[in-house]
């Protein structure tokens, strides 16, 4: 237990060093660390113990406890939010622990013997610590002393969704008041749970305190799983390095040699998914955590044990609400395994077929929820556009210049593009296939997972290259799959040794060059944000203290910032960073599309917003109320820099309730 405690402290140190370095209050860091231990690690520890006979490795225990505990926490928050018990979430450990203790008393004699992780040396610990520190350094993290608009719109989008999840059910879009928010929201379970328990606002938790949790945990879990399934500590380090040190080759060239225009040469954005997406990174952690349980379920020589199957179902149900693109790929990969064995071995793999059905059924409710909405984000991804990723990459323009980018030319470029897109992992896969070695059940499924994940990514075209969400989990699964091969080639002093060493050096070089600029941007931020600095913090603090949770702000400039920082909704946001706008925009890529009903609705609402801010009358607010049934009280947010006129008058229906040097806030008087 001493070793487990020491490792847990080390993991928490890797997670929280960036927030502390950015000036986050130590008291808040301590509160968040206590939440991670009490609400995530402890329930997850007992859940993991219920799945194993004994503790065989403290590092595996910590990684599995945090991953399983995170999944349980997400499900607990979803249950509490939908039942209206969200404010009682602090009692979650008291409810979860007795159940886990009962389950943990049962013995499981199967799992530990076959998947005994490789032993560690001091060098392995030091290398893993270095990778964890790099993961923390690369994660996009913001100090709250800066302007609220300093963070990128992606992060503000996720922080706004988390605030909505914290305060309202069912979910609506906080940037377009009372528009349904059909999105995979489970990933926000950690910041929402921490906000309820610690009292820290959700935006601070998303942008500052908890940003490094998933990237550090991803490296730890890749290290653990490659040691368990690949039986090599070196393979664990290679798997973690392939994912955590990933940099597009074009970025290496652009940063190292000033080759402008070659950044993201192959559109390889795995690092963005790991370090800049609060939904993608947890999904990658849970995908890797699923691997050893799939391996146990597929072990044909064993008798039936319900526990790994239950673990797969739990992780599938959670993953479907964290990132809806993962489990369909996982289930389809099991179907491909069945086909593989029928063709090559003339054997029907009943376990693979049953497990595929289990994953699909567990994920079905959330999957249907995500794809059923006509204007939802998920539907926007399914736009047929073969090889759109290759066509959109600078590589295609560079190589095919003058030859055009017809489908035939793109198909010829595809092998080279895949090598550049997948990076060093593609060379490991080539070496693994060339060796013609037998495949274990887990390796067979992992290879099918990678192949299936590449299919939709290469055949679909979505706004914002959202088809990459099918590739990210395939890339982290590929990292563990090729790690043993890369390790053997590296230690054999083959040409792969020099290629791998050069890749490590080039990646570290590009990361070292890029980090100072990333940190500078995080610190400086977008100082042009409306109400930047301390005054904006004061305004949002006033909104939190004096307006109800369901209040709606009518605001023209900076609404995405206000919806996030004040944890209130805004009447309208015209940014594409809302699922409905994203879906509408994606349909413009389809041939023959000439707009749609959604654009007309938003245009109508923009007119109402403009009227409320320029010539407010009770009739205007009555129209807004009609458009947003069920909304709370309305407040008009006015920037004095744009218009110094006081909108309040007897005829306007507005009452001035708060005023600063840069802003006025009015309450709408309704009868």
Image (cartoon, rainbow, N blue to C red):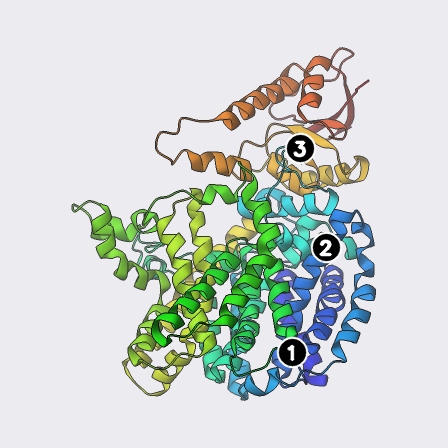
- How much space separates mark 2 and mark 1, taking CA atoms? 24 Å
- Does 86 sit above or below residue 595? below
Helix, strand or loop status at disc 2? helix
Check disc 1: other Cα within 10 Å, few if <14, some if 14-19, many if 20+.
many
Residue shown at 21% from the left, 56% from the top: 412
Q: Position of residue 29 (x, y in %)?
A: 71, 62
**Residue 584 located left or right of residue 315:** left
Which of the pair 659/456 is nearer the observer?
A: 456
Q: Position of residue 540 (x, y in %)?
A: 71, 39
What residue occupies the far left of the structure in this picture?
Answer: 402
Residue bearing the label numbered 2: 77
Asked if marks 2 and 3 touch (Cβ < 8 Å), the reply is no
Q: Quadrant of the C terminus?
A: top right
Which of the pair 375/624 is nearer the observer?
A: 375
Residue bearing the label numbered 1: 61
Residue 178: mark in rendering = 3
């Amino acid at each position: 237990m001493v070793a487990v405690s020491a490792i847990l402290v080390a993991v928490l140190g890797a997670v929280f060093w960036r927030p502390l370095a950015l000036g986050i209050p130590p008291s808040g860091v301590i509160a968040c660390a206590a939440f991670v231990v009490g609400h995530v690690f402890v329930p997850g520890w007992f859940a993991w113990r219920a799945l194993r006979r004994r503790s065989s490795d403290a590092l595996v225990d910590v990684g599995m406890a945090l991953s399983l505990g995170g999944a349980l926490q997400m499900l607990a928050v979803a249950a509490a939010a939908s039942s209206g018990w969200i404010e009682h979430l602090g009692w979650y450990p008291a409810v979860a622990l007795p159940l886990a203790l009962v389950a943990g008393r049962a013995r499981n004699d199967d799992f530990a013997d076959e998947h005994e992780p490789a032993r560690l040396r001091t060098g392995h610990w030091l290398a893993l610590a270095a990778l964890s520190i790099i993961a923390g350094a690369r994660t996009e993290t913001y100090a709250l002393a800066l302007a609220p608009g300093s963070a990128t719109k992606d992060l503000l989008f996720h922080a706004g969704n988390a605030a909505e999840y914290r305060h309202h059910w069912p979910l609506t879009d906080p940037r377009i008041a009372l528009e349904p928010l059909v999105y995979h929201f489970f990933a926000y379970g950690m910041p929402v749970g921490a906000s309820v328990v610690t009292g820290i606002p959700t935006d601070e938790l998303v942008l500052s305190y908890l940003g490094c949790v998933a990237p550090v945990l991803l490296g730890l879990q890749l290290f653990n799983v490659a040691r368990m399934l690949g039986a090599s500590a070196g393979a664990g380090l290679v798997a973690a390095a392939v994912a955590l040190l990933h940099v597009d080759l074009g970025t290496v060239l652009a940063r190292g040699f000033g080759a402008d225009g070659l950044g993201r040469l192959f559109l390889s954005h795995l690092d963005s998914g790991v370090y800049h997406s609060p939904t993608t990174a947890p999904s990658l952690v849970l995908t890797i955590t699923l691997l050893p349980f799939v391996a146990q379920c597929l072990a044909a020589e064993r008798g039936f044990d319900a526990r790994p199957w239950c673990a797969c179902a739990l992780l599938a149900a959670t993953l479907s609400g964290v990132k809806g693109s993962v489990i369909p790929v996982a289930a389809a990969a099991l179907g491909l395994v069945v086909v593989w064995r029928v063709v090559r071995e003339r054997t029907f793999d009943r376990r693979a077929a049953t497990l595929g059905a289990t994953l699909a059924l567990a994920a079905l409710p959330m999957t249907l929820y995500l794809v059923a909405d006509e204007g939802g984000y998920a539907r926007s991804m399914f736009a047929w556009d073969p090889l759109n990723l290759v066509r959109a990459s600078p590589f295609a323009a560079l190589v095919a210049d003058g030859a055009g980018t017809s489908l035939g030319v793109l198909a010829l470029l595809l092998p080279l593009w895949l090598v550049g897109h997948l990076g060093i992992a593609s060379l490991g896969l080539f070496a693994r296939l060339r060796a013609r070695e037998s495949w274990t059940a887990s390796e067979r499924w992992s290879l099918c997972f990678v192949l299936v994940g590449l299919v939709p990514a290469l055949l679909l075209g979505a706004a914002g290259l959202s088809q990459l969400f099918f590739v990210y989990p395939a890339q982290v699964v590929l990292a563990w799959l090729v790690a043993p091969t890369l390790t053997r080639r590296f230690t054999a002093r083959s040409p792969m040794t020099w290629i791998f060493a050069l890749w490590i050096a080039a990646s570290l070089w590009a990361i070292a060059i890029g980090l100072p600029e990333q940190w500078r941007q995080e610190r400086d931020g977008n100082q042009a944000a409306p109400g930047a600095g301390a005054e904006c913090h004061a305004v949002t603090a006033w909104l939190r203290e004096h307006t109800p949770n369901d209040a709606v702000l009518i605001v023209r400039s900076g609404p995405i910032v206000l919806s996030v920082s004040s944890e209130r909704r805004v009447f309208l946001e015209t940014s594409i960073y809302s699922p409905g706008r994203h879906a509408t925009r994606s349909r413009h890529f389809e041939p023959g599309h000439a707009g749609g009903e959604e654009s007309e609705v938003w245009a109508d609402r923009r007119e109402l917003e403009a009227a409320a801010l320029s010539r407010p009358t009770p009739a205007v607010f009555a129209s807004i109320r009609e458009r947003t049934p069920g909304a709370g009280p309305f407040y008009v947010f006015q920037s004095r820099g744009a218009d110094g006129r006081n909108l309040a008058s007897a005829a306007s229906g507005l009452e001035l309730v708060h005023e600063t040097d840069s802003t006025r806030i009015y309450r709408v008087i309704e009868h």
